[in-house]
Amino acid sequence: MRTFSFIARMPDDPGALHHAAEIIKSHGGNIHRVDYDRRIDPHIVFFQGEADEDAPEKITKDLQAIGYLQTSLATLRFLKFSVYLPDEPGMLFEFLGHTTGAGANIAFLDFDDRGKYPGRLTVSLTLDNDVVANKLLEQLKLRYRIEILEYDATGKKLDDTVFYIRFAQELREIIGTEDEDFLFRLLHDANHIAQELTSQGRDPHMVFRSILQTGSTLRQTAGMGFYSVYQEVPLINGGVLYCFQLPCGGSVYVLRNDGRVAMFDTGFGIYHREIVEMLAHFGLDVRDIEGLYITHADADHSGGGAFFDAPSLMHPGSMDIIREANRAYGSQMQGSILGQVYTKLINLFSLYNPPGNVRLLPPAGDRSRNGLPVLDEIEICGLRFEVLESLGGHLHGHVFYLCPEAGLLFTGDCLINFDSLTPEMEEFSTLAKNLMTTVNVDSERARKERKALLEITGDLDSVLKGNGSRLLVCGGHGAVSTLERDGLKVFGDLKRYDVAEHYAIK
Protein backbone atom coordinates (compact mmCIF):
# COMPACT_ATOMS: atom_id res chain seq x y z
CA MET A 1 0.00 0.00 0.00
CA ARG A 2 1.10 3.55 -0.71
CA THR A 3 0.13 6.71 1.18
CA PHE A 4 -1.22 9.64 -0.79
CA SER A 5 -2.35 13.20 -0.18
CA PHE A 6 -3.83 15.82 -2.43
CA ILE A 7 -5.80 19.04 -2.36
CA ALA A 8 -9.17 19.03 -4.07
CA ARG A 9 -10.81 22.21 -5.33
CA MET A 10 -14.49 21.44 -5.71
CA PRO A 11 -17.66 23.34 -6.52
CA ASP A 12 -19.71 24.43 -3.54
CA ASP A 13 -22.54 22.12 -4.62
CA PRO A 14 -24.48 19.31 -2.89
CA GLY A 15 -22.82 15.94 -3.48
CA ALA A 16 -19.45 17.30 -4.64
CA LEU A 17 -17.52 15.84 -1.71
CA HIS A 18 -19.40 12.54 -2.09
CA HIS A 19 -18.45 12.42 -5.77
CA ALA A 20 -14.75 12.87 -4.93
CA ALA A 21 -14.92 10.15 -2.28
CA GLU A 22 -16.61 7.87 -4.81
CA ILE A 23 -13.68 8.28 -7.23
CA ILE A 24 -11.18 7.47 -4.49
CA LYS A 25 -13.17 4.41 -3.47
CA SER A 26 -13.41 3.19 -7.08
CA HIS A 27 -9.62 2.84 -7.15
CA GLY A 28 -9.44 1.06 -3.79
CA GLY A 29 -8.33 4.13 -1.90
CA ASN A 30 -8.82 4.27 1.85
CA ILE A 31 -9.29 7.81 3.20
CA HIS A 32 -7.60 8.29 6.57
CA ARG A 33 -8.13 12.02 6.94
CA VAL A 34 -10.22 14.67 5.27
CA ASP A 35 -10.17 18.34 6.28
CA TYR A 36 -12.68 20.90 5.10
CA ASP A 37 -13.81 24.15 6.71
CA ARG A 38 -15.93 26.51 4.64
CA ARG A 39 -15.12 29.31 7.10
CA ILE A 40 -11.58 29.21 5.73
CA ASP A 41 -12.14 28.34 2.07
CA PRO A 42 -15.50 27.09 0.68
CA HIS A 43 -13.87 25.08 -2.10
CA ILE A 44 -10.69 23.46 -0.75
CA VAL A 45 -10.66 19.95 0.75
CA PHE A 46 -7.52 18.17 2.00
CA PHE A 47 -7.39 14.38 1.59
CA GLN A 48 -4.94 11.85 3.01
CA GLY A 49 -5.09 8.08 2.73
CA GLU A 50 -3.55 4.97 1.25
CA ALA A 51 -4.11 2.82 -1.82
CA ASP A 52 -2.38 0.29 -4.04
CA GLU A 53 0.89 1.37 -5.64
CA ASP A 54 -0.52 2.75 -8.91
CA ALA A 55 -3.87 3.96 -7.55
CA PRO A 56 -2.90 7.53 -6.48
CA GLU A 57 -2.04 8.49 -10.07
CA LYS A 58 -5.38 7.09 -11.29
CA ILE A 59 -7.27 8.93 -8.54
CA THR A 60 -5.63 12.27 -9.32
CA LYS A 61 -6.16 11.77 -13.05
CA ASP A 62 -9.91 11.18 -12.58
CA LEU A 63 -10.28 14.09 -10.19
CA GLN A 64 -8.41 16.37 -12.56
CA ALA A 65 -10.59 15.25 -15.46
CA ILE A 66 -13.71 16.62 -13.73
CA GLY A 67 -11.92 19.76 -12.52
CA TYR A 68 -11.79 18.65 -8.87
CA LEU A 69 -8.03 18.78 -8.38
CA GLN A 70 -6.00 21.80 -7.26
CA THR A 71 -3.05 21.46 -9.62
CA SER A 72 -1.45 24.87 -9.32
CA LEU A 73 -0.78 27.53 -6.71
CA ALA A 74 0.00 30.18 -9.30
CA THR A 75 -1.06 33.66 -8.27
CA LEU A 76 -4.56 34.41 -9.51
CA ARG A 77 -5.51 37.73 -11.06
CA PHE A 78 -8.22 39.79 -9.40
CA LEU A 79 -10.41 41.82 -11.74
CA LYS A 80 -13.18 44.21 -10.77
CA PHE A 81 -15.22 46.07 -13.37
CA SER A 82 -18.64 47.46 -14.19
CA VAL A 83 -20.56 46.17 -17.19
CA TYR A 84 -23.67 47.83 -18.60
CA LEU A 85 -26.17 45.17 -19.66
CA PRO A 86 -29.08 45.94 -22.00
CA ASP A 87 -32.52 45.64 -20.44
CA GLU A 88 -33.37 42.50 -22.37
CA PRO A 89 -34.31 38.96 -21.35
CA GLY A 90 -31.33 36.61 -21.01
CA MET A 91 -28.66 39.33 -20.88
CA LEU A 92 -27.23 38.17 -17.53
CA PHE A 93 -27.23 34.57 -18.76
CA GLU A 94 -25.33 35.60 -21.88
CA PHE A 95 -22.81 37.64 -19.87
CA LEU A 96 -22.15 34.75 -17.50
CA GLY A 97 -21.51 32.55 -20.51
CA HIS A 98 -18.47 34.69 -21.30
CA THR A 99 -17.05 34.51 -17.76
CA THR A 100 -17.68 30.77 -17.50
CA GLY A 101 -16.00 30.21 -20.86
CA ALA A 102 -12.92 32.06 -19.60
CA GLY A 103 -12.75 29.87 -16.49
CA ALA A 104 -13.29 32.85 -14.22
CA ASN A 105 -14.35 32.35 -10.62
CA ILE A 106 -16.92 35.00 -9.69
CA ALA A 107 -16.55 36.43 -6.20
CA PHE A 108 -19.06 39.28 -6.36
CA LEU A 109 -22.02 40.44 -8.46
CA ASP A 110 -24.16 43.50 -7.73
CA PHE A 111 -26.75 45.33 -9.88
CA ASP A 112 -27.06 49.09 -9.43
CA ASP A 113 -30.81 48.79 -9.01
CA ARG A 114 -31.10 51.95 -6.90
CA GLY A 115 -28.79 54.17 -8.89
CA LYS A 116 -28.85 56.00 -12.21
CA TYR A 117 -28.03 52.88 -14.25
CA PRO A 118 -30.15 49.88 -13.17
CA GLY A 119 -28.48 47.77 -15.85
CA ARG A 120 -24.99 48.40 -14.48
CA LEU A 121 -23.51 45.25 -12.95
CA THR A 122 -20.41 45.40 -10.75
CA VAL A 123 -18.38 42.22 -11.05
CA SER A 124 -15.39 40.87 -9.11
CA LEU A 125 -13.72 37.72 -10.36
CA THR A 126 -10.44 35.79 -10.38
CA LEU A 127 -8.61 34.44 -13.41
CA ASP A 128 -5.54 32.28 -13.99
CA ASN A 129 -3.30 34.79 -15.75
CA ASP A 130 -2.98 38.06 -17.67
CA VAL A 131 -3.61 36.44 -21.05
CA VAL A 132 -6.96 35.00 -19.94
CA ALA A 133 -7.93 38.30 -18.30
CA ASN A 134 -7.11 40.31 -21.43
CA LYS A 135 -8.95 37.86 -23.70
CA LEU A 136 -12.08 38.02 -21.54
CA LEU A 137 -12.05 41.81 -21.49
CA GLU A 138 -11.65 41.99 -25.28
CA GLN A 139 -14.66 39.71 -25.72
CA LEU A 140 -16.77 41.73 -23.31
CA LYS A 141 -15.79 45.07 -24.87
CA LEU A 142 -17.11 43.89 -28.24
CA ARG A 143 -20.56 43.34 -26.73
CA TYR A 144 -20.90 45.66 -23.70
CA ARG A 145 -19.82 48.96 -22.27
CA ILE A 146 -17.07 48.14 -19.73
CA GLU A 147 -15.40 50.22 -17.00
CA ILE A 148 -12.35 48.67 -15.32
CA LEU A 149 -12.39 49.46 -11.60
CA GLU A 150 -9.46 47.42 -10.35
CA TYR A 151 -6.94 44.88 -11.59
CA ASP A 152 -4.42 43.15 -9.35
CA ALA A 153 -1.81 40.59 -10.41
CA THR A 154 -0.10 40.24 -7.01
CA GLY A 155 -2.72 38.22 -5.14
CA LYS A 156 -3.22 40.97 -2.56
CA LYS A 157 -6.87 41.60 -3.47
CA LEU A 158 -8.04 37.99 -3.54
CA ASP A 159 -10.94 37.25 -1.21
CA ASP A 160 -11.59 34.18 0.94
CA THR A 161 -13.16 32.22 -1.90
CA VAL A 162 -9.54 31.45 -2.85
CA PHE A 163 -8.07 31.62 0.65
CA TYR A 164 -5.38 28.96 0.20
CA ILE A 165 -4.16 30.46 -3.07
CA ARG A 166 -3.74 33.79 -1.35
CA PHE A 167 -2.08 32.13 1.66
CA ALA A 168 0.35 30.31 -0.65
CA GLN A 169 1.23 33.61 -2.32
CA GLU A 170 2.05 35.18 1.05
CA LEU A 171 4.14 32.14 1.99
CA ARG A 172 6.03 32.53 -1.30
CA GLU A 173 6.95 36.08 -0.38
CA ILE A 174 8.34 34.92 2.98
CA ILE A 175 10.30 31.83 1.97
CA GLY A 176 11.08 32.84 -1.61
CA THR A 177 10.21 29.65 -3.47
CA GLU A 178 8.28 28.86 -6.63
CA ASP A 179 8.39 25.11 -5.93
CA GLU A 180 4.68 24.25 -6.01
CA ASP A 181 5.13 20.69 -4.70
CA PHE A 182 6.86 22.13 -1.64
CA LEU A 183 4.09 24.70 -1.18
CA PHE A 184 1.40 22.01 -1.46
CA ARG A 185 3.10 20.05 1.34
CA LEU A 186 3.39 23.22 3.38
CA LEU A 187 -0.32 23.93 2.92
CA HIS A 188 -1.11 20.43 4.19
CA ASP A 189 0.99 21.11 7.30
CA ALA A 190 -0.54 24.54 7.90
CA ASN A 191 -4.02 23.10 7.47
CA HIS A 192 -3.26 20.31 9.98
CA ILE A 193 -2.35 22.78 12.68
CA ALA A 194 -5.37 24.97 11.84
CA GLN A 195 -7.79 22.04 12.03
CA GLU A 196 -6.28 20.82 15.30
CA LEU A 197 -6.64 24.23 16.93
CA THR A 198 -10.08 24.83 15.41
CA SER A 199 -11.26 21.63 17.12
CA GLN A 200 -10.17 23.30 20.37
CA GLY A 201 -12.34 26.32 19.66
CA ARG A 202 -9.66 28.56 18.15
CA ASP A 203 -10.33 30.92 15.25
CA PRO A 204 -8.82 29.27 12.14
CA HIS A 205 -7.97 32.63 10.57
CA MET A 206 -5.97 33.53 13.71
CA VAL A 207 -3.92 30.38 13.17
CA PHE A 208 -3.02 31.28 9.60
CA ARG A 209 -2.31 34.89 10.60
CA SER A 210 0.07 33.66 13.31
CA ILE A 211 1.91 31.45 10.81
CA LEU A 212 2.40 34.32 8.39
CA GLN A 213 3.29 36.78 11.14
CA THR A 214 5.96 34.41 12.45
CA GLY A 215 7.64 34.21 9.06
CA SER A 216 7.27 37.85 8.11
CA THR A 217 8.53 39.14 11.48
CA LEU A 218 11.69 37.05 11.21
CA ARG A 219 12.31 38.30 7.70
CA GLN A 220 11.67 41.94 8.62
CA THR A 221 14.01 41.87 11.62
CA ALA A 222 16.93 40.39 9.70
CA GLY A 223 19.24 42.62 7.65
CA MET A 224 18.69 46.33 8.19
CA GLY A 225 15.77 45.66 10.54
CA PHE A 226 18.01 43.84 13.03
CA TYR A 227 18.58 45.17 16.54
CA SER A 228 19.61 43.84 19.93
CA VAL A 229 19.08 44.89 23.50
CA TYR A 230 22.35 44.06 25.24
CA GLN A 231 24.22 44.01 28.54
CA GLU A 232 27.95 43.99 29.15
CA VAL A 233 28.42 42.51 32.62
CA PRO A 234 31.81 42.39 34.40
CA LEU A 235 32.25 39.17 36.38
CA ILE A 236 33.77 38.75 39.82
CA ASN A 237 36.76 36.83 38.45
CA GLY A 238 37.64 39.54 35.92
CA GLY A 239 35.83 38.09 32.91
CA VAL A 240 33.00 39.70 30.95
CA LEU A 241 29.59 38.32 29.99
CA TYR A 242 27.66 39.77 27.06
CA CYS A 243 23.91 39.17 26.78
CA PHE A 244 22.30 39.89 23.42
CA GLN A 245 18.51 39.89 23.28
CA LEU A 246 17.76 39.38 19.60
CA PRO A 247 14.59 40.83 18.02
CA CYS A 248 12.91 37.40 17.92
CA GLY A 249 13.57 34.28 19.93
CA GLY A 250 16.18 33.48 22.54
CA SER A 251 19.03 35.46 24.02
CA VAL A 252 22.62 34.75 22.99
CA TYR A 253 25.36 34.89 25.62
CA VAL A 254 29.08 35.35 24.96
CA LEU A 255 31.57 34.72 27.76
CA ARG A 256 35.04 36.25 27.51
CA ASN A 257 37.49 35.21 30.19
CA ASP A 258 41.26 34.91 30.38
CA GLY A 259 41.57 35.77 26.67
CA ARG A 260 39.17 32.99 25.64
CA VAL A 261 35.63 33.15 24.22
CA ALA A 262 32.60 30.85 24.41
CA MET A 263 28.95 31.18 23.32
CA PHE A 264 25.83 29.91 25.06
CA ASP A 265 23.05 29.30 22.50
CA THR A 266 23.19 30.67 18.98
CA GLY A 267 19.88 32.38 18.18
CA PHE A 268 17.95 31.82 14.95
CA GLY A 269 19.98 30.94 11.88
CA ILE A 270 18.42 33.82 9.95
CA TYR A 271 20.30 36.29 12.20
CA HIS A 272 23.76 34.76 11.84
CA ARG A 273 25.28 37.42 9.59
CA GLU A 274 23.96 40.21 11.80
CA ILE A 275 25.24 38.44 14.93
CA VAL A 276 28.73 38.18 13.44
CA GLU A 277 28.76 41.90 12.61
CA MET A 278 27.35 42.82 16.02
CA LEU A 279 29.97 40.78 17.87
CA ALA A 280 32.69 42.44 15.81
CA HIS A 281 31.31 45.81 16.96
CA PHE A 282 32.06 44.70 20.54
CA GLY A 283 35.54 43.44 19.65
CA LEU A 284 34.48 39.80 19.54
CA ASP A 285 35.67 37.68 16.62
CA VAL A 286 33.53 34.57 16.02
CA ARG A 287 36.68 32.75 14.90
CA ASP A 288 37.88 32.98 18.50
CA ILE A 289 34.85 31.13 19.88
CA GLU A 290 36.13 27.87 21.37
CA GLY A 291 32.79 26.18 21.89
CA LEU A 292 29.02 26.50 21.59
CA TYR A 293 27.06 25.38 24.64
CA ILE A 294 23.48 24.57 23.69
CA THR A 295 20.75 24.56 26.34
CA HIS A 296 18.10 22.92 24.14
CA ALA A 297 17.13 22.13 20.55
CA ASP A 298 14.55 24.84 19.80
CA ALA A 299 15.42 26.79 16.63
CA ASP A 300 15.94 30.07 18.49
CA HIS A 301 18.60 28.45 20.70
CA SER A 302 20.41 26.04 18.38
CA GLY A 303 19.40 27.16 14.89
CA GLY A 304 22.62 28.94 13.97
CA GLY A 305 25.02 26.28 15.25
CA ALA A 306 26.37 24.99 11.94
CA PHE A 307 27.25 28.53 10.79
CA PHE A 308 30.03 28.61 13.40
CA ASP A 309 33.30 26.69 13.14
CA ALA A 310 33.37 25.98 16.88
CA PRO A 311 32.20 22.55 18.16
CA SER A 312 28.94 22.30 20.10
CA LEU A 313 28.06 20.55 23.35
CA MET A 314 24.51 19.33 23.83
CA HIS A 315 22.35 16.62 25.38
CA PRO A 316 21.68 13.47 23.28
CA GLY A 317 17.98 14.33 23.54
CA SER A 318 18.61 17.59 21.72
CA MET A 319 20.26 15.69 18.91
CA ASP A 320 17.20 13.38 18.76
CA ILE A 321 14.87 16.39 18.42
CA ILE A 322 17.05 17.86 15.66
CA ARG A 323 17.09 14.56 13.80
CA GLU A 324 13.32 13.98 14.16
CA ALA A 325 12.43 17.64 13.45
CA ASN A 326 9.84 17.46 16.21
CA ARG A 327 10.23 19.57 19.36
CA ALA A 328 7.76 17.29 21.17
CA TYR A 329 9.99 14.24 20.65
CA GLY A 330 10.81 12.37 23.86
CA SER A 331 7.81 13.81 25.73
CA GLN A 332 4.20 12.96 26.46
CA MET A 333 3.25 15.26 23.55
CA GLN A 334 5.37 13.38 21.01
CA GLY A 335 2.37 12.41 18.86
CA SER A 336 0.89 15.92 18.83
CA ILE A 337 0.55 17.40 15.37
CA LEU A 338 1.02 20.87 16.87
CA GLY A 339 4.60 20.26 17.98
CA GLN A 340 5.53 18.52 14.74
CA VAL A 341 4.12 21.15 12.40
CA TYR A 342 5.33 24.11 14.44
CA THR A 343 8.87 22.67 14.32
CA LYS A 344 8.70 22.39 10.52
CA LEU A 345 7.40 25.94 10.15
CA ILE A 346 9.81 27.67 12.52
CA ASN A 347 12.78 25.74 11.13
CA LEU A 348 11.80 26.81 7.61
CA PHE A 349 11.16 30.46 8.43
CA SER A 350 14.29 30.87 10.59
CA LEU A 351 16.81 29.19 8.22
CA TYR A 352 17.45 26.43 10.74
CA ASN A 353 21.06 25.23 10.53
CA PRO A 354 21.70 23.24 13.74
CA PRO A 355 25.13 22.20 14.99
CA GLY A 356 26.92 19.53 12.99
CA ASN A 357 30.19 19.26 14.91
CA VAL A 358 28.68 17.97 18.17
CA ARG A 359 29.94 16.44 21.39
CA LEU A 360 27.20 14.77 23.39
CA LEU A 361 26.89 14.92 27.15
CA PRO A 362 27.18 11.65 29.10
CA PRO A 363 24.25 9.98 30.89
CA ALA A 364 23.35 11.10 34.41
CA GLY A 365 25.31 9.61 37.29
CA ASP A 366 24.57 9.52 41.00
CA ARG A 367 25.11 13.21 41.69
CA SER A 368 22.34 15.80 41.65
CA ARG A 369 21.72 19.36 42.77
CA ASN A 370 18.27 20.16 44.17
CA GLY A 371 16.83 17.18 42.33
CA LEU A 372 18.47 18.00 38.99
CA PRO A 373 20.99 15.34 37.84
CA VAL A 374 24.59 16.48 37.31
CA LEU A 375 25.60 15.17 33.89
CA ASP A 376 29.16 16.44 33.80
CA GLU A 377 31.69 18.96 35.09
CA ILE A 378 33.41 20.84 32.30
CA GLU A 379 35.85 23.68 31.82
CA ILE A 380 34.73 26.69 29.77
CA CYS A 381 37.16 29.57 29.29
CA GLY A 382 39.08 28.58 32.41
CA LEU A 383 35.93 28.31 34.58
CA ARG A 384 34.41 25.15 36.04
CA PHE A 385 30.79 24.51 35.13
CA GLU A 386 28.34 21.87 36.25
CA VAL A 387 25.97 20.68 33.54
CA LEU A 388 22.58 19.94 35.07
CA GLU A 389 19.89 17.91 33.35
CA SER A 390 16.35 19.27 33.29
CA LEU A 391 13.28 17.19 34.07
CA GLY A 392 12.07 17.55 30.48
CA GLY A 393 9.39 20.11 31.27
CA HIS A 394 10.13 22.68 28.60
CA LEU A 395 11.84 20.29 26.20
CA HIS A 396 13.43 16.85 26.23
CA GLY A 397 17.21 17.14 26.49
CA HIS A 398 17.19 20.59 28.07
CA VAL A 399 20.28 21.32 30.19
CA PHE A 400 21.55 24.09 32.46
CA TYR A 401 25.11 25.39 32.86
CA LEU A 402 26.10 26.45 36.39
CA CYS A 403 29.37 28.10 37.49
CA PRO A 404 29.27 28.92 41.24
CA GLU A 405 32.79 30.40 41.04
CA ALA A 406 31.80 33.16 38.60
CA GLY A 407 28.18 33.34 39.75
CA LEU A 408 26.60 32.25 36.45
CA LEU A 409 23.55 30.09 35.76
CA PHE A 410 22.39 29.58 32.17
CA THR A 411 18.82 28.29 32.39
CA GLY A 412 17.54 28.25 28.82
CA ASP A 413 13.77 28.69 28.70
CA CYS A 414 13.12 27.29 32.17
CA LEU A 415 13.71 30.70 33.79
CA ILE A 416 12.92 33.93 31.93
CA ASN A 417 12.68 37.55 33.04
CA PHE A 418 9.62 38.45 30.96
CA ASP A 419 9.61 42.02 32.27
CA SER A 420 12.87 42.67 30.41
CA LEU A 421 11.43 41.86 26.97
CA THR A 422 10.56 44.67 24.57
CA PRO A 423 6.90 44.80 23.42
CA GLU A 424 8.01 43.50 20.01
CA MET A 425 9.82 40.54 21.57
CA GLU A 426 6.83 39.82 23.77
CA GLU A 427 4.47 39.88 20.78
CA PHE A 428 6.63 37.44 18.83
CA SER A 429 6.87 35.08 21.80
CA THR A 430 3.06 34.80 21.88
CA LEU A 431 2.96 33.47 18.30
CA ALA A 432 4.47 30.10 19.28
CA LYS A 433 1.88 29.77 22.02
CA ASN A 434 -0.86 30.64 19.53
CA LEU A 435 0.25 27.73 17.34
CA MET A 436 0.99 25.15 20.05
CA THR A 437 -1.24 26.30 22.98
CA THR A 438 1.84 25.90 25.25
CA VAL A 439 5.60 26.07 24.76
CA ASN A 440 6.23 23.43 27.46
CA VAL A 441 5.94 19.75 26.57
CA ASP A 442 5.10 18.86 30.20
CA SER A 443 3.70 21.67 32.34
CA GLU A 444 3.97 19.81 35.66
CA ARG A 445 7.63 18.98 35.12
CA ALA A 446 8.25 22.55 33.97
CA ARG A 447 6.93 23.83 37.30
CA LYS A 448 9.19 21.39 39.22
CA GLU A 449 12.35 22.30 37.33
CA ARG A 450 11.59 26.01 37.68
CA LYS A 451 11.22 25.50 41.45
CA ALA A 452 14.53 23.62 41.57
CA LEU A 453 16.33 26.36 39.63
CA LEU A 454 14.96 29.08 41.91
CA GLU A 455 16.13 27.10 44.96
CA ILE A 456 19.62 26.74 43.46
CA THR A 457 19.65 30.46 42.65
CA GLY A 458 18.55 31.44 46.15
CA ASP A 459 21.06 29.16 47.91
CA LEU A 460 24.07 30.22 45.85
CA ASP A 461 23.07 33.87 45.81
CA SER A 462 23.11 33.92 49.61
CA VAL A 463 26.70 32.63 49.61
CA LEU A 464 27.86 35.05 46.90
CA LYS A 465 26.27 38.03 48.64
CA GLY A 466 28.72 37.43 51.48
CA ASN A 467 31.50 38.09 48.96
CA GLY A 468 29.84 41.21 47.61
CA SER A 469 28.60 39.58 44.40
CA ARG A 470 25.42 37.95 43.06
CA LEU A 471 24.36 34.85 41.19
CA LEU A 472 23.45 35.99 37.68
CA VAL A 473 20.50 34.22 36.08
CA CYS A 474 20.96 34.04 32.32
CA GLY A 475 17.50 33.10 31.06
CA GLY A 476 16.57 31.76 27.66
CA HIS A 477 14.92 35.06 26.75
CA GLY A 478 15.39 38.50 28.18
CA ALA A 479 18.11 40.03 30.30
CA VAL A 480 20.73 38.84 32.76
CA SER A 481 18.92 39.09 36.09
CA THR A 482 19.18 38.57 39.82
CA LEU A 483 16.61 36.93 42.06
CA GLU A 484 14.93 39.43 44.36
CA ARG A 485 11.99 39.04 46.73
CA ASP A 486 9.50 40.05 44.05
CA GLY A 487 11.06 37.99 41.26
CA LEU A 488 13.78 38.34 38.64
CA LYS A 489 15.16 41.84 38.17
CA VAL A 490 17.48 43.16 35.44
CA PHE A 491 21.11 43.33 36.55
CA GLY A 492 22.95 46.46 35.39
CA ASP A 493 22.10 48.59 32.39
CA LEU A 494 20.24 47.66 29.22
CA LYS A 495 21.50 49.26 26.02
CA ARG A 496 20.46 48.97 22.39
CA TYR A 497 22.38 48.11 19.24
CA ASP A 498 20.69 48.88 15.90
CA VAL A 499 22.28 47.64 12.72
CA ALA A 500 20.86 50.61 10.76
CA GLU A 501 22.46 53.12 13.15
CA HIS A 502 25.69 51.13 13.07
CA TYR A 503 25.88 51.41 9.28
CA ALA A 504 24.88 55.09 9.41
CA ILE A 505 27.81 55.80 11.74
CA LYS A 506 30.15 53.94 9.40
Image (cartoon, helix red, strand yellow):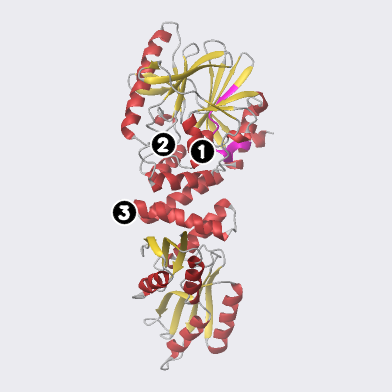
User: Residue 199: which numbered mark, if any?
Assistant: 3
Q: Which mark is residue 330?
A: 2
Q: Which residue is mark 1?
A: 322
Q: Nearer the viewer, mark 2 or mark 3?
A: 2
Q: Amino acid at mark 1?
A: Ile
Is residue 486 positioned above or below 126 on the image? above
Which is nearer the eye, 427 or 115? 427
Q: Earlier in the sequence, mark 1 or mark 2?
A: 1
Q: Residues within 10 Å of mark 3 (few under 14, many from 20)?
A: few
Nearest the viewer among 22 and 191 is 22
Q: How far apart are labels 1 and 2 at the CA level?
A: 12 Å
Residue 125 visible in the snapshot: no
Residue 271 is one of the magenta-drawn residues: yes
Q: Which of the two residues, 9 or 137, is positioned nearer the viewer here?
A: 9
The span picked out in magenta is 262-273
* Quadrant, the C terminus: top right
Q: Earlier in the sequence, mark 1 or mark 3?
A: 3
Q: Do we see residue 240 in this rendering? A: yes
Mark 1 against mark 3, which lies toward the viewer? 1
Disc 2, SS = loop
Tell whether position 453 is magenta: no
Neighbourhood count class around disc 2 (C-alpha, 10 Å): few under 14, some 14–19, many 20 upward:
some
Element on which disc 1 rests? helix
Check the image and report above or below for 411 versus 181. Answer: above
Residue 464 percent coordinates (x, y): 43, 9
Please, which residue is most extreme toward the top here?
A: 466
Q: Position of residue 468 (x, y in %)?
A: 45, 7
Relative placement, left or right, of 156 versus 451 is right
Looking at the image, residue 49 sits to the left or right of residue 278; the answer is left
Q: Is residue 315 above or below residue 441?
A: above
Give the answer, above or below, for where 88 lies relative to 203: below
Percent across and percent down for residue 94 are 47, 89
